[in-house]
Amino acid sequence: MEKKDKANIQAIQEIIRKEQVWESDTGKKDAALYYYHITYALKRQWQTIGVNVSDAIQVFETGYDDNWTYIIEPAPYNPDLTFTDLINMFNISPEAWEIRNDMQIILNTVERRNEFVSMIVNVNEESTARLLRELKEKYLTYCQLLDGDFMKLYAVNPVNALSVYFLEPLDIVTFWDWEAAGGSYKKAIQYKREEPLISLIHAIERAEDEAMDIAFGLGC
C-alpha cells in the first residue's frame, strides 16, 4: 500500500498476536484469522486482525473501523510533551511547514498538545490538519486568551501577542500592515469580542475600512 493511500502512517513499535478470531474455511492453520495488538509512536494501543503480522499491519494502515480496527488503550498523559516531541511522534516532514507552524502556534501548552494526541484517531497529514483546524476554532471560541493577558503581551512583544491571540503565524511585515491600518490592542480585543473566529488579515482589512471611513468623514 502506497503512503498516500494509508489512513494510519505510523512507525509500529510492537505487534503481538492474540487469540484466534475464527478458523480458516480451508482448515489450514496458517490461514486462520487472529487478533493483533499494535503499539506505535503515540504510545497507544490498537486492536486489529490479520492472518499474519504483515496482513495485520496492512489492515491497521487502512484506518479505524468500528468492528475490527480500533483503539483499546489511549496514550498516557505526558506532562513533558513538547512541540518537538509532536513533530517526531507524528513524523511531520520539513516540507509540511504549514502543519508544523500550526502545531507550534495552536498547540501552545502541554495540555493542548496532550489533548491533540488523545483526540486524533487515524494519523496522517489530512487528519492532522483537520484536527488542528477544529481545535483552533474551539480555542478561539471558548478558550480565548484573556484580554488582560493579551494587553500585557502586546506591551512587551506585539507580534507574538497577536500571533497567540489570533492563533496564526505572524511576521513583522504583517504587523506593519496592522499598525499602518490603525490596528491596536484595543481594536484586536474589540474585533475578537464581536467575531471570535476573525482572522488577522480580515482584522487588518476591517481596520483599513474604518480608517478610510474616518478619512472621508463617514465614521460616526
Image (tube, rainbow, N blue to C red):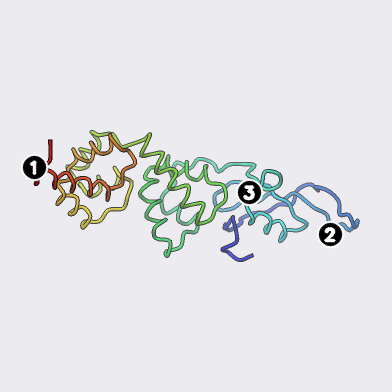
Contact flag, marks 1 and 3 (Cβ < 8 Å): no
Task: Please provide percent x and percent y for residue 118.
Answer: 52, 42
Residue at x-position 50% and y-position 40%: 77
Label placed on residue 102:
none
Q: In this view, does 220 lie to the left or right of 131?
A: left
Quick one: label 1 or label 2, which is nearer the N terminus? 2
Three-letter code for the amino acid on which mark 2 is drawn: Asp
Would you place residue 3 above or below residue 19 in this image? below
Q: Position of residue 111 (x, y in %)?
A: 42, 39
Residue to which mark 1 is pinned: 217
Say which amino acid is labelled 1: Gly
Sooner in the amino-acid sequence: mark 1 or mark 3: 3
Identify the residue position indicated by label 2 in the image.
30
Give me the disc on residue 64. 3
C-alpha span from label 1 to label 3: 59 Å
**Residue nearer the viewer, 29 or 196:** 196
Count the labels in the image.
Answer: 3
Q: In this view, does 117 lie above or below 177?
A: above
Q: Residues within 10 Å of mark 1 (few under 14, many from 20)?
A: few
Task: Look at the numbered disc 1 and give the secondary structure of its residue.
Answer: loop
Element at badge 2? Answer: helix
Q: Does 12 sit left or right of 80 as displayed?
A: right
Amino acid on which disc 3 is placed:
Tyr
Q: Which residue is drawn at 43% across and 43% down?
A: 135
Whole-number angstrom distance, CA of label 2 to CA of label 3:
25 Å
What residue is shown at x 78% (from left), y 57% (from top)? 51
x then y, percent, for residue 129: 46, 52
